[in-house]
Image: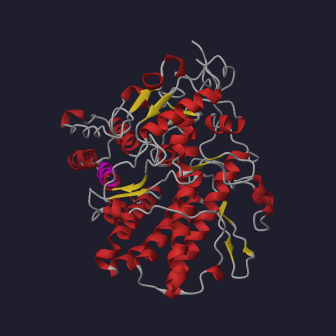
Amino acid sequence: MTTPTHSKRRAVRASLAVALLGAATLAACNQDKLLKVPTPDVVLPGDIASKAALPSAFASAVGDFQLAYAGGYGGQLPLLDYNEGYAQITALLTDEMLNAETYTTRIEVDRRATTPINSTTLQTFQVAQQARATADLVAARYRDLDPTNPNRAEAQALAGYMYVMFAEGYCNGVPTSRVLADGTFEYGPPQSGTQLLTTAVAKFDSAITVATTGGAAGSTALNLARIGKGRALLDLGNYAQAAAAVASVPSSFVYVIQHSETTGRQNNAFFAFNYLEARFTISDKEGINGLPFVTLDDPRAPVFAAGDVLGDSYEVGFDGSTPLFFTTKYFDYKSPTPLAIGAEARLIEAEAALKIGDVGTFLTKLNAARAAALTYPSVPDQTSPARPQPPALTAADIPATLAGRVDLLFRERALTLFLTGHRVGDLRRLTYQYGRATESVWPTGPYQEDNPDKQGTNYAADVNLPIPQEESNNPQFPGGQCINRSADIK
């Protein structure tokens, strides 16, 4: 097999990208925000001094959230060409994506061996903290200047999601500092996942209250907050409360973060890392325990070999040896990244039913989630229709054992919520809520043992991301170290 140069590979993929450009078809597109914020500068309280400034501030909050959660392409910090968002970096940490290039900082994440001095995860952490702080600030300014505006509820909900992501994706000990009116910092102490999630629930409750008073205009923010609250309560082990929180969410609900080809900051980072740069590939049974995402080729997570479109000489990634697989979920610069969908609400209800042994409701809710799931074309062609939803399960598909039913639930979650930042929280929950041994859940054993260029190392023990060493500058965070690296959120 002839391995092409990186520049030639990128040129071919760029040509493919141009051929495939076009906005993906969106459900409920009127609720999505197309962002045009040109810089990632921190929004200061003094910048939002009047009601007239609120729309721009809200755009900044959504723009910062997009970069933090869904990533970008083209660089946001000096000398960096890419921006992995939370969704990309946690996909690499779990069994969704596999490293297909040579950068040691990304190999660390993929190999479950991330150090606090990792520059890649530093950028992701900093941008996430910025998004959290901006959303908190903007929600507070709406409270003071335009308290009944539904945008207040949406900003508050986005802040809540950032707290959830810190709790799910990072070690116990994430601080949450804030910028004061004079531009100085009020440093926050390290917090456990439980503390972060408790704060998130309060923020979602606030968003729900504001959105409810807004009537129809607040419906998008209302359902976004309800799903976020259900997700946080699920992480906390409050299954019945989680189901109650999402019970009113329509199965058809879709809230996506929309991307654009206008600037690198707005590009879809999954497309950039997978198609354009061939740095990440879709995993298949990664590290013994990983799900067979490639083999399954489920309509919720469709995958195809790069050679099927680019030719035999483009079957491997940037490193010249890792088999390269694409997903049609994110196949151009503008492919939207789902944040919350109605199918997730039904999966939360299914889990609550499973916890009390209600197998009938468990099956019904799984099928409701299947019927509502977002699906995608088999090939990266804008004109091709999405594949049908997966067929309904029957009673015969429900395993007889509790362990088998848990396997089924988390497999359904993995496919329905593929590459949306949920998988890391689910793998952790399998340990601290379902009692499974860490190394029976996470990728383990020899690292890429079939890859001649990466043989000789093993997966390490990470089940989350560390706090970057730079946080040691926080006077309330002596040593800048995690409270613990446990899968548990305590």
Most extreme residue toward the top is: 1
Residue 123 appearing in the image: yes
Q: Position of residue 165 (x, y in %)?
A: 54, 56
Determine the image quadrant of residue 140.
Answer: bottom right
Q: Which part of the image, by quadrant, shows the N terminus?
A: top right
Q: Is residue 102 left or right of residue 307?
A: right
Residue drawn at 40 percent across, 46 percent down:
22
Q: Position of residue 476 (x, y in %)?
A: 76, 68
Q: Is residue 350 magenta-colored? A: yes
345 or 129, nearer to the observer? 129
Q: Is residue 353 above or below residue 403?
A: below
74 or 327, nearer to the observer? 74
Residue 444 appearing in the image: no
Q: Position of residue 77 (x, y in %)?
A: 71, 54
Q: Is residue 312 left or right of residue 361?
A: right
Residue drawn at 42 percent across, 31 percent down:
293
Q: Is residue 186 left or right of residue 359?
A: right
97 or 471, nearer to the observer? 97
Determine the image quadrant of residue 397.
Answer: top left
Range covered by the magenta-colored residues: 346-355
Q: Is residue 53 left or right of residue 378?
A: right
